[in-house]
Image: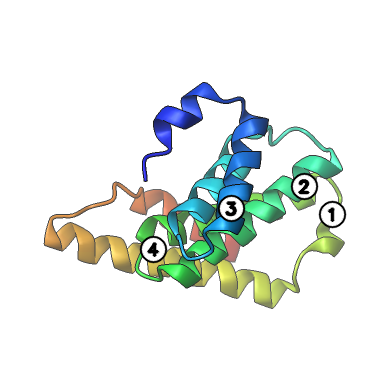
Amino acid sequence: MRLTPLAKQLSREKLISCLKLATKNDPTSHALPYALGVHLTQEGDMNDPSDERWEEICQGVESFERSIVLNPADARAHYNLGMALSDRHKYAMRTRRMHLLPPPQEAAESLINALETAIQLEIKCDEAGCSNGINIAEAFLTLGDFVL
């Protein structure tokens, strides 16, 4: 499914609405929750302290998690989940929402698992000649920032 041509024609709000509807109508597609996660987490304003932005970030994390359940071998979904978890943590710290996060041990394990899995899958893909273009160095740096 190619969402890019459609996505370029819609506003962010309309695209997110369409992706939510499509995800409900096709619960077996891993591509739809992945695309929804990307648009919810990466295209919003991380300086917007509103409750709506917080909900978008949380929904984006959930979308990546759903995509991974449907396709556990997708390195991009693991990578973007790890980055979204890191962003959610930083956003919560900036906007005084730390109490809404999972317990620290659980949060750390989720982030570490997502990024380590992404790195492992990407290395295997790269060796097979099918690299996804994941920034492995950034994944390691994000792990280091979070663990320290």
Q: Which residue is mark 3?
A: 84
Mark 2 to mark 4 CA distance (whole Å): 25 Å
Say whether marks 3 and 1 touch (CB < 8 Å).
no
In this image, 92 relative to 21: left or right? right
Q: CA distance from mark 1 to mark 4?
A: 27 Å
Q: Amino acid at mark 4?
A: Ala
Label 3 close to label 4 by CB (< 8 Å)? no
Task: Give the x, y percent position of residue 91.
Answer: 73, 47
Q: Earlier in the sequence, mark 1 or mark 2?
A: 2
Q: Where does label 2 land, which residue?
A: 54
Q: Identify the disc placed on residue 97.
A: 1
Residue, far top: 9
Please give the residue where the numbered disc 4 appears in the rendered image: 118
In the image: residue 29, left or right of residue 20: left
Instruction: In the rendered structure, find residue 69 and report the number of the disc placed on it.
Output: none
Q: Secondary structure at mark 4?
A: helix
Give me the C-alpha separation between circle 2 and circle 3: 12 Å
